[in-house]
Amino acid sequence: MKYILILSVAVNIFLLMKVTAMRLSLKELRCGFSERISLNSNKLLGVSSRDKEVRALTKALNEMLVALREAFHKYERGDAEIKTAITNIAHDLRTPLTAICGYLELGEKLEKSPELKHYLDVIAERAEHMKKLTEELFEYALISGGEIREDKQEICINTVLENAIMNYYPAFSKRGIEPEVDICETKISRRLYPSYVERIISNLLSNALKYSDDDLNITLESNGKLTVSNSSAELSAVDVNRLFDRFFTVESARNHSTGLGLSIVKLFAERMNCPLSAKYEQGKVIIEIIF
């Protein structure tokens, strides 16, 4: 009986040591995995345990890490190749489009029949539209690479917004839109990237121009919150949730777009840590950004 008790105690001690060692090994794996999950690291997991199953688990996890890293690097290379291809294609398209627009301007100066003038006007409109879309693709390929090519500066948001509204006013008038503008008198000065702020505001107004049902409200509050809202029967609450997605568009007879305008807004807002949101309430699209 005494020997049985001694043997039982010895077995329990052995099992306790085994469980403790297993727990330590699992902790090693957990901590090691957390450190090596970075896909830019080539380090693999290591474990001090001599247990066959623990070492088999470590091997399996290392194989998974290697596969994940290979897939990630393949994705990175593919993403870079796509951006390069878009940049090159957009660049190649810009040259002939610029030439076409130039020859059309020369053609405007020549004597022509009313029918030919109509055809040339249509061609000029389509060529200008293609040129604009090409510029958007070219710009997006450049900016999505993550490079910031300017320094932050003190910017007066009020002034940038006022200038943008004035630039778009002829286009709004052509659509029969009379913007209701409420810009606070308090000077809102922020240290941000100038071109980013200008492009954000310009793209928000351009988006309103595309989708507005002939109304537009623009509000700038003293806390730096800019709100752009307009009625839009073409959009819905579901669509609004996708407005900032790349290449998302709402098909319509009067509007064709790359769908990059608001995705660029989102990208720039994130780089400047400016909260951005969109919602659909009572038939209105409401986009808010806080500078």
Image (cartoon, rainbow, N blue to C red):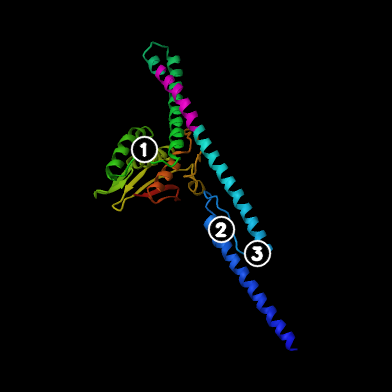
Is there CB contact under 8 Å for labels 3 and 1? no
Where residue 198 appears, x then y in whole percent?
Answer: 34, 40
Q: Residue at coordinates 54% horizontally, 39% vertically from top-left?
A: 77
Where residue 281 appears, x then y in whole percent?
Answer: 44, 51
Is there CB contact under 8 Å for labels 1 and 2? no
Closer-to-camera residue (29/143):
29
- Whether residue 122 is visible here, answered yes or no, is no
**Residue type, mark 3 in image:** Arg
Q: Which residue is mark 3?
A: 50
The N terminus appears in which quarter of the rendering? Answer: bottom right
Callout 3 secondary element:
loop
Q: Which residue is mark 1?
A: 177
Q: Give, as a single range, the part of the protein colored magenta.
A: 86-103
Residue 11 to residue 251: above or below: below
Mark seen at residue 33: 2
Lower sequence index among marks 3 and 1: 3
Q: Residue furthest bottom?
A: 1
Dot 2 surroundings within 10 Å: few (below 14), some, or many (20 or more)?
some
Mark seen at residue 285: none
Q: Is residue 62 found left or right of 84 in the rendered image?
A: right
Where residue 96 appears, x then y in whole percent?
Answer: 46, 21
Q: Residue at coordinates 42% horizontally, 14% vertically from top-left?
A: 114
Residue 264 to residue 35: above or below: above
